[in-house]
Each structure stands twice: as structure tokens, then as C-alpha cells.
Amino acid sequence: MATVVSVENVKDVRALLRTLDARVVPQRQRLFADVLSVSLRLGPILAATLASSLGLRQRLRHELATRRLEVVTLDAGPDATPSDGSWRTWWMHTLDLARVLVDLLPEDSQHGSISTTLPRSATAALARAPQPPAPVAPGAAQEAAEQAAERAADREHELHELREREWQAAARLMADLSGGLTEIAWHTGRLVRVAVEAAPQTLVSGSKDVVRLLERADPARIGACLSAAQLADAAESPAQALTRLRRARLSVVKLRLGNHADPELAATARTMLAAVLGGVRADCDHLEVDGTEELDAARDELGAVGLDGAADRPMPGVGRAV
């Protein structure tokens, strides 16, 4: 189980280490953890810098080990998604994160993951944009209403075509991302999988969209990230989402647990954990919580569904956990 450390605004390794020393190392000491697993939420600038320098990656790995911290998963949450909204920029950022992660993994781990949301949908923004009303001449209300209906139909058709083109481009890029991840694995001998998380104002609002997005991607490289909050937003139950993903032969790469102080989200998280991890084998790579203060609550949730100690057992191929 990894705790998210938001460092998306950090631009260099020194600043990253100062953040870890101030915010994370004291928490590891408070928890009496021999090693604390952290999920770094890296922004595009630092990710690109690290991806371009083996020396910097090796230094960061050494500094993490010195602080008894380890990284088996990275998080490219909504705040770390490239600000220009470009799919190509997002693709480059995701592969930069994969290149960084393979060199941060502990020696006894050959498998990491990256969770990400997609760039904002251009057609979603257009659909929300208000249309100015056309001037109406006196006595022409009926004609104006017919013209307005015709314009609305034309606009809906145009948005549908634009959205279909956006879906096609996104599906192609996911296939390209699969290829990039395969190349990294071939060169390094380490596997990194990407977990796509649904988010507002993107193409993906639920598991049905994840299935459509990944229809041309390699399921061994890319899967889904499920969270209690996302399932609630999509009005999906964990069982519904998991069934849809399994029918498409897609896996849950990461589970993100929400704020335990919200009773509804806590109940959804408990059901999600039972559905995904309660079978014969664990069906995800990593568990993630937002901050070290959520770790104890997450362990309680695991215990509530009969998975005591699951956070301390390695997931398939990972080999390390908190």
C-alpha cells in the first residue's frame, strides 16, 4: 500500500527531497515503519528532467533508500496532467513517468504502476459553452423557434462527429502507449503498467468508457484505476465496474481509497476492496491512499472485509509493500 505525496509543483530533486524530509520522513517515524511506500505525484517538468538523466534517477533512488522510503507506483493525478490539455503531451508525460519508475523500483521488485487521468475533453468544453440567442423579429417567434431547433440539431451532430474523432485519436494513442511501455520493459526488464482513472470533463467517466478507450491497447500494459469517489460520481457499484472490466479482459491495476471520514465513501471502498481483493487471487497491483493519515484507516477497511494483513502482502509481481 502506498501513500500519495503531492509534489506536482516541485521542479527539481533538491526541492523534492526537502519536501520528503519535511512531510514524509516524520510520518514514517511516527508509524514505526521500517520502510514506507510512497506514490509520488510528479509534474511534467520534474518527470521530464528525471527521465532525461540516469544520474539523477540513481541519486533519487539512493536518497529514497537512505530515508527508508520506496517507490513502486507513481501518480499523475489531475493536478499533474499537462496544463495544455494536449494528448501528445500527456502521452510523453506518461512515458517519462514510466522511464523514471523503472529506475526507482527497489532491487527486489520488477513491477511498477502509474495511475493517470486523461486530458480534458475538447468536445466536453464545447458542449458546455453557452450559445448566444439569435435575434428574433417581431411576429416571427414560430420561425425563430424552428431555426433554433435546427441550429441545435446541427450543433449536436457536429459535437458528435468531433467526439468520435477524439475517441479515435485517444484509442490510437493508447495503442502507442502500450508500445512505448513494451519498449521500456524490453530495455530494462521491468514492467510498468498504466492505470486509467475516470475523471470529470474527460472522455472517461466510468468503466464503460475505460473499456471503449482500451479496446486497441495491450491489456497486459494498461488497465483501470478504481476509486470509491470515482465510482460514486459514475453511479456505479464496484461489482458492476469489475464485471464490465473483466468481460473486456481488462484488469484493475490500482485501487485508490477515499477519505475514511465520509461514511458513504468508506462503505464503497470496503465493498470495492472485497470485490477486487476478496477472491482467490489479488486482482490489482497496488493500493493507494491520500496521505499517511489514511494508512491506519485503510488497514481497518481491509480488516473489515476479512483481508487483515493484505497491505503487508506483496501483490502479484510487485514484491514490496508498506
Image (cartoon, rainbow, N blue to C red):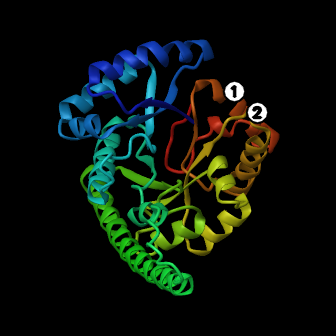
Label 1 sits on residue: 296
Label 2 sits on residue: 300
Is there any visible trace of residue 102 in the rendered image? yes
Give me the disc on residue 147. Answer: none
Q: Position of residue 283 (x, y in %)?
A: 62, 56
Q: Position of residue 298 (x, y in %)?
A: 69, 34
- Cα gap from disc 2 to disc 1, whole angstroms: 6 Å
Residue furthest toward the front?
138
Q: Quadrant of residue 205?
A: bottom right
Density class for disc 1 (Cα within 10 Å; few <14, some 14-19, many ≥20) is few
Position of the N terminus, as image quadrant, is top right
Q: Secondary structure at mark 2?
A: helix
The relative height of residue 136 versus residue 177 in the rendered view (above or below) is below
Q: Position of residue 111 (x, y in %)?
A: 43, 48
Observer-nearest residue: 266 or 104? 266
Q: Cβ–Cβ below 8 Å for labels 2 and 1?
A: yes
Q: Secondary structure at mark 1?
A: helix
Q: Quadrant of residue 129?
A: bottom left
Observer-nearest residue: 7 or 201? 201
The relative height of residue 278 versus residue 12 in the rendered view (above or below) is below
Is there any visible trace of residue 189 in the rendered image? no
What's the amino acid at mark 2? Asp
Observer-nearest residue: 188 or 166? 166
The total number of labels drawn is: 2
Q: Quadrant of residue 167?
A: bottom left
The relative height of residue 179 versus residue 104 in the rendered view (above or below) is below
Instruction: Locate residue 33 relative to residue 153 in the image: left or right.
Output: right
What's the amino acid at mark 1? Asp
